[in-house]
Image: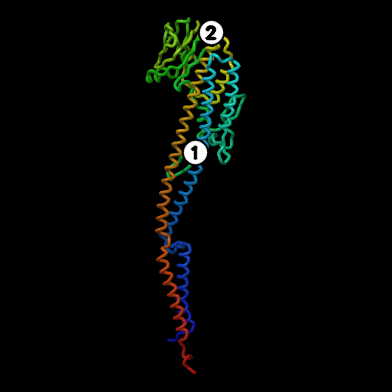
Amino acid sequence: MRISTHSIYQRGVRPITDRQSNLAKVQEQISSGRKILKPADDPTNAARLMELNKQIQLNDQYGRNIIIANGRQGIEENALQESGDILQRARELTIQANNAALSDENRQSIALEVRQLRQQMLDIANTKDGDGAYLFAGFNEQTQPFTLDNGEVVYNGDQGQRLLQVGPSRQVAVGDPGDAVFMSIRSGDDQFQVGTGVRNTGSGAISTGGITDPIAFQDDFMGHEYRVDFTDANTFDVVEITNGVESATQVLSNQVYVAGQPISFRGMQVIVSGTPADGDEFTVKTAQNNSVFKVLDNLINTLESPSGTPLERALLTGSLANALTDLDQGLQHLSQLQGSIGSRMNALDAQDDVNQTFNLQLQELESKIGAVDYAEAATQLSEELLGLQAAQQSFLKIQGLSLFSYLS
């Protein structure tokens, strides 16, 4: 059989090119650190590596979300802390103002400081985050949440609460809507509130006493308003009012009044002190939501009211007591929100630890499947280099086999 020179060259070159290709592949594996350079090298493990890489990238995004969430939570926590400091200062001023030795001018000076505190509170309510979005606007992050309308603070945001995905099955709130923070302060003692009739002429003042029977309070008191009517300085009635209509049957009738002694009905009690006059009245009703700005506005109005007559002094005392109660409710409300933020930040830290641990497991598995074993690769590189040299030497030997070499 005749063997052409072309066939000899083809058979001699093929091992060389195969070895060169294998050598180049091993060199690329060593330089890149990847054992699988293309899916065809190992289709099954290549698919697994793609899924692992997707999970790692997703975990990295969770980590970035946690950083963003912690940043917004930190800004909100500072805002609430500053708001609490403002209410605490207003509380101190309220106690200071409830001093009989102070004149109306003294209280008006205190009112000026409370006005400044109110403006500071408004500025805090319009706080922005690091991206320039309003922190307390709900989903309307580009709309200023709190503005003035005829002197009243109004909320322009919505009730939305932004959530961020921080784990495969976990979302964490990264803020609270402004209405829940600044517009939902419970008045009174969180259960009911009291008031003094504007036409009272005596020096009587009313304050909340507390709930004595939670079941009776829930079943009988809730849904109604009540009025304590003094028929003279020593006798009073308690009247129930439902939807603005006075009940024909009195809750209490012809009760003897003793200053400072609790007046109990429908599972709760209030305390009237001082000397009420004939026709004086006091209101008792379920606590309502109030804005922190309204609380400060009421305090300002109280501080700017005259206190020259016994009636005015009684109204001042009662209004300052109510203001103090509302401020305490505001402080408690902000404290609860701060606790919620702290819980969310703790949850973010815990989730971050879980994500990092999972990421290490994914990277370890990715390394086992797709990373190069450098000792094994170095051995294979030496083998391929030796094979290439052998193939080249063999080709040179075969190329020299010719009868013309022996003819001379």
Q: Amino acid at mark 1?
A: Val
Name which residue lies at 49% across and 82% down: 6
Instruction: Point out which mark residue 201 bears.
Output: 2
Which amino acid type corresponds to the residue marked 2 in the rendered image? Thr
Question: Considering only vertical position in the picture, is 347 above or below 34?
Answer: above
The one of 406 and 305 positioned closer to us in this rendering: 305
Of mark 1 and mark 2, the one earlier in the sequence is: 1
State whether residue 15 is above or below residue 5.
above
Q: Secondary structure at mark 1?
A: loop
- Image coords of residue 25 (percent x, y): 46, 67
Look at the numbered disc 2 and give the secondary structure of its residue. loop
**Quadrant in the picture for the N terminus:** bottom left
Report if the CB atoms under discs 1 and 2 are less than 8 Å apart.
Answer: no
> Where, by quadrant of the figure, is residue 248 drawn?
top left
352 or 18, which lies in front?
Answer: 352
- Find residue 400 and report its horizontal and vertical position in percent: 47, 86
Which residue shows up at 45% across the image and 54% down it?
53
- What is the basis of the colouring in this image? rainbow
The one nearer the camera, 10 or 256, is 256
Q: Residues within 10 Å of mark 1 (few under 14, many from 20)?
A: many
Q: Residue furthest front?
A: 101
Name the residue at 44% across, 13% down: 271
Q: Residues within 10 Å of mark 2 (few under 14, many from 20)?
A: many
Which residue carries the number 1 mark? 174
Vertical order, 213 against 135 (above or below): above
